[in-house]
Amino acid sequence: MTAAGLIRTCPLGDAWFAVSTGDRAPVATVDGRTVSVDEAADAAAAILRQARAPLVYGLGQTSCEAQRRAVGLGEAIGAVVHPAGGGAASVAYQAIGSSTATFGEIRDRAELVVVWRADPAVTNPRLLERLRLERATRGQRALVVVDAQPTATAEEADAFVELDTRHDVEALWSLRALVTSGPLDHDRAGALPLDDLAERLLAARHVAVLYGAVDEVSALALFSLVRDLSRDRHAVTLGLRRDGNARGAEDVLAWQTGFPAAVSFARGYPRSNPGELSAAALLEHSEVDAALVVASDPLDHLPAAAADRLRELPTVVVDTRATATSQAARVAFATAADGIEVPGTVHRMDGVPVPLRAPVAAERPGLEDVLTAIGGRL
Amino acid sequence: MYDPANGIAGEVRDVCVQDGKIVADVPRHARSIDARGMVVMPGGVDIHAHIAGPKVNAARKLAPEEHRADVLERTAIARSGSGGTVPSTFATGYRYALLGYTTVVEAATPPLAARHTLSEIRDTPVIDAAFLVLMGNNLPLFELIRSEPARVRDAIAWWLQATGGYGVKLVNPGGVEMWKRSNANVTSLDDEGPGVTPRRVIETIATAVHELGLPHPVHVHCNNLGVPGNWRTTLDTLRTLEGRRAHLAHLQFHAYGGRPGGRPRSRAPELAEHLNAHPELSADVGQVMFGPAMTMTADAPVSAVLREVTHGRWVNADTEAETGCGIVPFTYRERNYVHALQWGIGLELFLLSRDPWRLVLSTDHPNGGSFLSYPRLIRLLMDREFRNAQIRRVNRKAMKRTVLLDDLDREYTLEEIAIITRAGPARLLGLRNKGHLGVGADADITIYDDRDDREAMFAAPRHVIKDGRPVVEDGELREAGPGRLLRVGADYDPSIEPTLEKLFEDRYSVQFASYPVREPWLLEPAHTVATEPR
């Protein structure tokens, strides 16, 4: 099965299918040397056993089944488990909660969809189609994009609101005042181009806000706005994720520990403090002495200081793809591909669990197999 | 030994166990537990709780402060976790086992999210678990009810097979759809808003479940939950269901007199009387216990009302074509009129019930309080002095609206407790291997010290045996293997599939072919209970 043989794949899907068809990295390497899976699992277990402050990082690009193994392994070695991305919205969620909906509800009911600092046309190529938000199909429904500069999604939109990132909270708070007739500093609010958006929000009976990269405070402001809106109309919000199963990682961690974001098992029980326990902060403060990276490429996306520190650590990478991180790792496994060779479950960004099938027989172990092999040696 | 299903109430007997089952006899060298002076019952069966799935997990994520305050350390046999009103999955399994419960029903799963619920059940050790699928606001089903009601039976059987579910749950039929559509609700069984009246939904689905012969009848969370005056809706629902078996969830929340917007009154005596007179009906109480709770429900419009009461955290989550979800953390306070009245109504229902087999214990965990409060509730039922002391502490005006100030002298016996916490729920669920200790039953056994303080007694059983294995010994967790999924095996006419596929097309964002759960690791190990079609 090749990308050409499939209908309905997007560029991200093509890239994923290419993983299993092109030249593949050796199944297992130790210090760049090709070894057996058993030998690499021994080496990985030795690293993790010796570690006093291990980090388990990533998880977002594999199945819930592998994620659940990764969290179990993190617990067994007393690690900090940090799912890549996320976190910002969970703080806001824990403060006031949120209103959300699955794709079908937004597609069939939202009269107005606001995309707040996200560019799904690029990052989630099929999302607009699935939410029936493309110009040709959305009919009377309106799409408004809010971002610092025009985006591909903005091209599709009925309106684009240009808003500097620094003004997020101010803008969201002003919108709250505008839609609730609350007290408002009109001089300041007037400087932001919000009147049209406020009018649209007030006129719609059903509103959805899709958000991308927002910090804790902006997320709180956004959830507050949606809550205000929900008093007189139905209003929901949905966070876009970078990794395909980032939502699953959050869900698995929450059901196993009670906490949705970075968790430390150092004391034998789960402890959560999202700021303190982030991988970036721990690495920068030299509070990690070994890392297990699962289905993620932190050298590509962590801040430079944290990435530099990670490069110096004994690292085990379990991933389907060859990445900068796997190439720099002491022990690297290149696994069979979820959804091609390995079945499993992923949670969409809206929380809906969907199955991954395995049309092709795997000739190498999957992520869950490798994590189980390492775990069995601890 | 208390084994009410076999007519045994407080007899001294041997219980023999082999290969996970109760047997007539065992070899002399078999391991034995000396339970002299102790009380032996079947393992507890919880007919209505919220322990697994997207709604539960959304609530877990909402309550980090509860988890920080109540942690479980990893041990040689147990995973770590956290507790509070919504414990992590592992903590849920261990704590139910440590409470002497071996079977729990998750009462509300959106069928679209079955994989999520099954994944959590897989990580919930020791206990056997089943879940009910939400069908009361399902748009394809509404369409079928309008156009081809005779085929609803096949559709329901298909849904149960597609999800691994055990039974059918209706939550505020029609009302949740109105909420998702326009923040509205239904107020009566004849409301036309959803395009099909709640009455029609209830009648058609109850009939379908009855004809399918599912082991558990339709499980109904009535319309107008929490609304003063809702007892009329509840009675109307019961009359609509007449002639078919039905189970009402958390009856306490549906037993209010008064007028909408006004102060609620108790109508527990009227509902208890109706239930007493109709042997085909059953209910669990949904007792409110003072202290922290987490309200979580598919009845999302109710949560939006509660939000305006607490002004605190609120979660709403709409599931396409099927259901909604609302979550609001909540604390029940003794001094608060409404909370005290709710507490009182629950106790009235228990104390006025004449058939413990049909009115069984629940707190609608964690809506009325955590399952960890069951021992206290048992003491309230068994210990009149304790109960009266509590009654004197709580809001006086509320107590005056109940019959509790009449010093009801009823005290539940151990036999009756065994009925409302295991034998009754197992019978209502149609779980023939559960809730009793007769030959052939699953060897799920709980052994308590016979203590005067019934709360202390039921909070910490000395031994718990699950499938013949000692999981709790001397009050400590000894073994924590996986539990089993309990599901139903219902046949359907395959010609329903193309019909459903058409109804799916415009309403779901997942493909029809991807919808049914087939993954063996999510569905096994399982025990499948057969239907008895009528």
Image (cartoon, grey):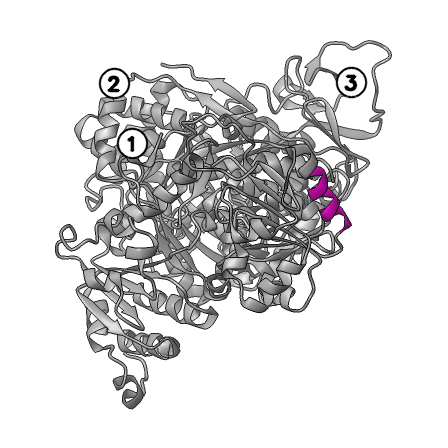
Q: Secondary structure at mark 2?
A: loop
* Circle 3 residue: B13
Distance of label 1 from label 2 (alpha carbons): 31 Å
Q: Secondary structure at mark 1?
A: helix
Distance of label 2 from label 3 (alpha carbons): 53 Å
Residue B375: in magenta span: no
The residue located at (53%, 48%) in the rendering is A59
Q: Residues within 10 Å of mark 1 (few under 14, many from 20)?
A: few
Where is the C terminus of chain A found, in terms of image quarters? top right
A346 to the left or right of B23:
left
User: Nearer the observer, disc 1 or disc 2?
Assistant: 1
Of the numbered discs in the image, which one, if any, rests on residue A5?
Answer: 1
Q: Are marks 2 and 3 in contact (CB under 8 Å)?
A: no
B377 and B154: which one is in front?
B154
Question: In terms of sequence position, does the residue under pointer 2 or pointer 3 come before the other?
Answer: 3
* Circle 2 residue: B495
Residue range of the region highlighted in magenta in the rendering = A41-50
Whether marks 2 and 3 lie on the same chain: yes
Q: Name the dominant secondary structure of the magenta segment.
A: helix
Where is the N terminus of chain A found, in terms of image quarters? top left
The correct choice, above or below, for B301 with respect to A229 in the image is above
The correct choice, above or below, for A131 with respect to B440 in the image is below
